[in-house]
Image (cartoon, rainbow, N blue to C red):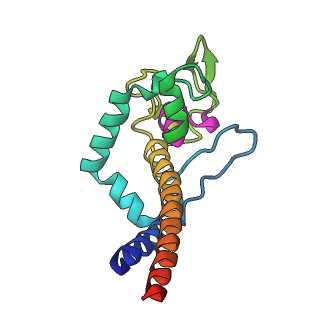
């Protein structure tokens, strides 16, 4: 029981340490957060940006057809899943950066007015299989999804560890 408690506490501490640096900056007049790779811990950056790992993550995002589903829509089950689990990944990988000032015509992003503002402006593509998967914002969005979900998990694990400590203490008192 003590080993389980220590493992829970160690995981919770590790999760908080790895995720503490993340701070996606909400920009003025932008309805969603824009992510930058430098906003995350070096350890997490190293894990996600490893070429082998990123190739698998990119393939998974592409195969999921995530960019076909609007995060604003509540009608499709898959859009709800994207909204709940991977909204930050959707924002980083499927939507061009706001600084590019893309126009939306018939559901497609056309002609950025400010293509020199960010390297991601010229990398973005309307093809739903490649949208902004090669942009710096995509791995940053993935990292934000990881951070968000890990923080929730770490809180849950910390609560479980607290409950185990109470049970352990009560059990020791009964002896």
Residue at 45 percent of width and 42 percent of height? 138
Q: Residue furthest top?
A: 106
Nearest the viewer among 53 and 104 is: 53
Q: Is residue 24 left or right of residue 66?
A: right
In the displayed image of the protein, which residue is found farthest to the left? Answer: 52
**Placement of 127 over or under 171, stated as above or below:** above
Q: What is the residue that sits farthest to the front in this orientation?
A: 174
Could you tell me residue 52's position as x and y percent?
24, 48
- Is residue 164 shown above or below 74? below
Q: Quadrant of residue 59?
A: top left
Residue drawn at point x = 61 percent, y = 13 percent: 105
Task: Answer whether residue 16 is visible to the viewer in this image.
Answer: no
Residue 13 percent across, percent down from the top left = 47, 73
> Residue 119: x and y, percent?
49, 41
Please say if 175 is above or below 72.
Answer: below
Residue 6 at x, y percent in the picture: 39, 78
Q: Quadrant of the C terminus?
A: bottom left
Q: What secondary structure is the magenta-colored segment mainly? A: helix
Query: For the magenta stretch, what is the residue range?
Result: 87-100
Residue closer to the observer: 157 or 105: 157
Number of numbered discs on residues: 0
The residue that appears at 36% across and 77% down in the rendered structure is 1
Q: Is residue 5 magenta?
A: no
x 33%, y 42%: residue: 57
Q: Is residue 173 visible in this depiction of the protein?
A: yes
Pick the front one: 132 or 78? 78
Q: Decide which of 88, 45 is in the foreground and name it.
A: 88
């Amino acid at each position: 029981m003590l080993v389980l408690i220590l493992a829970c506490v160690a995981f919770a501490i590790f999760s908080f340490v790895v995720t503490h640096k993340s701070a996606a900056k909400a920009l003025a007049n932008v309805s969603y957060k824009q992510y930058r790779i430098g906003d995350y811990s070096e350890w997490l950056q190293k894990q996600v940006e490893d070429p082998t790992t990123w190739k698998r993550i990119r393939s998974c995002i592409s195969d999921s057809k995530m960019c076909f589903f609007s995060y604003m829509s509540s009608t499709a089950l898959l859009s709800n899943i994207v909204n709940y689990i991977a909204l930050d990944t959707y924002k980083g990988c499927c939507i061009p950066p706001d600084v590019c000032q893309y126009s939306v015509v018939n559901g497609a992003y056309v002609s950025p007015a400010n293509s020199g503002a960010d390297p991601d402006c010229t990398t973005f593509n309307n093809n739903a299989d490649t949208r902004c998967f090669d942009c710096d914002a995509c791995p940053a969005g993935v990292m934000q999804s990881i951070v968000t979900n890990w923080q929730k998990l770490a809180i849950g694990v910390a609560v479980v560890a607290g409950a185990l400590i109470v049970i352990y203490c009560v059990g020791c008192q009964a002896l």
